[in-house]
Image: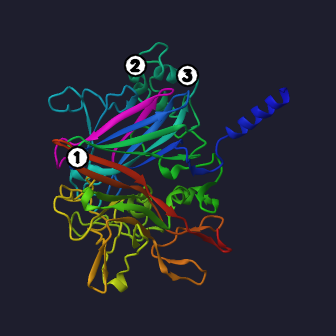
Amino acid sequence: MMMMRKLALLCFSMLALPAAAVNLNPDGLGQVLIYPYYTVNANHQTLVTVVNTRPRGKAVKVRFMEGRNSREVLRFNLYLGAHDVWTAALFALDGDGQANLVTADESCTVPDLRGSDLPTIPNTTRRYRPFSNTSYAGSDAGPDGLNRTRIGHFEVLEMGEVQQGSAVEAALVPPTPASPNCAAIADAWQTGGSTPLAGIWRANPNAQLLAPTGGLFGNVALVQVADGAYYNYNAEAIAGFSRIVQHGAPDADLPTLRDVNEGASPTVQSQVPTESGVLSSIWPRSTQGIDAISALFVRATVLNEFLVEPTLAASSEWILSAPTKRYYTDPLLSGSAQAIAPFQRSFPLSLGGQDGGATACDDLVPSLYDRSGSRLNERSDGISLPAPTPCFAVSNAWIRIEPPVAGMPSSLVGSSGANGQVPGIWREVRAYLGVAGLIQQRFPAGWLSLAFHDPAAIGANGLPAPLVRPMRPSQDGDIWNGLPVTGFWALRIENANARPGVQGFYGGLYPHRGTRLCSNSSGTC
């Protein structure tokens, strides 16, 4: 019995070791959380949670980025206590203003998101932090207005775990039920303070912190109060991101997704689940660290459903989010005027004085099927699908039937249209099939494939010809084809007669599926 007990303990300790490679954790726990979408358009609010499941505090970097070029619009440090949860809401005060963040949570942030120097929501005493345009105004060819902050994506990166018995732990987890001592946490970044933590992080940012251990998860809810609409999704969780403390000052870049590491090793390994098993690729950390993260998200095709049944007043919209795109297409981050593979085009820094028309588009091939397996064939059916090109860090595809149904909303989750919103991947998908030009069969429901390669063009290696450029080869010769994207299908259904005098709205968000395509000198990876 004692031997069995020892063996059980050994097995448990082996399982508890840090992951040997960076990976997307299917259980949703990790050191890094990727939230592919936020919006305050069309009267939406975005509700955010970050949960620490560990019995130790965490130092966390939170970074919000606008949807065109992923320029930062809000950045701060979040300090979570043991088993702590942080909550916040994004909102807009009007139909054309910037996004704002408001929180009543007592978890510590630096800078203070509830500080007395911040504006208050009208007719309340609640303080809020406005999003800023300083990162992009005048420094890229996109629009300079604050309404560019109204949609985007965001990320949470664990910088380190709080040392047991430290003064930092005491500040975050008081000995009696009480609010954490956020003044002391802020004081750690100052000089000349009066608390026990005064200046410790200014002198040494990693003081009283240990390497990250993960255990974070997060959720988002997109809420439209007027319609009673509520959509929610889980954040993508990256495990095995870092084996060292990377505690950057609140206004510092450190850490970013490029700072993935395996301690002192000059390489980092990514593990990507596929239909045929988990594929591992090794990357030089100093030059291709971001590729190790992109490999987790790269898809040769993106697959999901749609529903636009008129009798249900159903609306469908796809969100495609590219969490690493800025490191390949923004010259200020990539260091290259030309886009770095796999992306095809860079986001220009200027347009010869013209403002607002900048894009960084990539090519793809759409294939649309109904629920009986019939495929919309553009050539034989004489139907032309507008060429979809995801042009931004966050792009949307609004799917509708043709001709459009009167009264259908133009955008489901407020991502396209007027008021500075990011345009869609395409304006519409003509969801019908013409037979010999005489009979039209509508496609009110089915599924859609977006391929970043040409399924009809097979190369000498037996693989489809890519439309976008393959990713840069890994150190062990693996070449991943496609684009690193994530996102979801948003569905909304209206019931005009939920009960007498009441109109009902129903909806849901469904994560995208996809296929992987990896090759090396021996064929497939």
Determine the residue positioned at 16% across, 44% down.
94
Question: Mark 1: few, some, or many residues within 10 Å (few <14, many ≥20)?
Answer: many
Q: Which residue is tagged 3? A: 166
Percent position of residue 92, x then y: 22, 43
Whether residue 56 sits left or right of residue 446 in the image: it is right
- Asked if the residue under mark 3 is in contact with the one under mark 1, i.e. CB atoms within 8 Å, the reply is no
Q: Which residue is tagged 2? A: 179
The amino acid type of the residue labelled 3 equals: Ser
109 lies above or below 386? above
* Quadrant of res 163: top right
In whole angstroms, how far apart are the C-alphas of marks 1 and 2?
A: 31 Å
Q: Quadrant of the C terminus?
A: bottom right
Confirm whether residue 413 shows in the render. Answer: no
Q: In this view, which residue lies farthest toward the front?
A: 500
Q: Which residue is tagged 1? A: 98
Determine the residue positioned at 56% across, 47% down.
25
Whether residue 34 sits left or right of residue 310 in the image: it is right
208 lies above or below 324? above
Whether residue 285 sits left or right of residue 348 in the image: it is right
Question: Which portion, as a residue range, is magenta?
Answer: 73-97
* Quadrant of res 406: bottom left
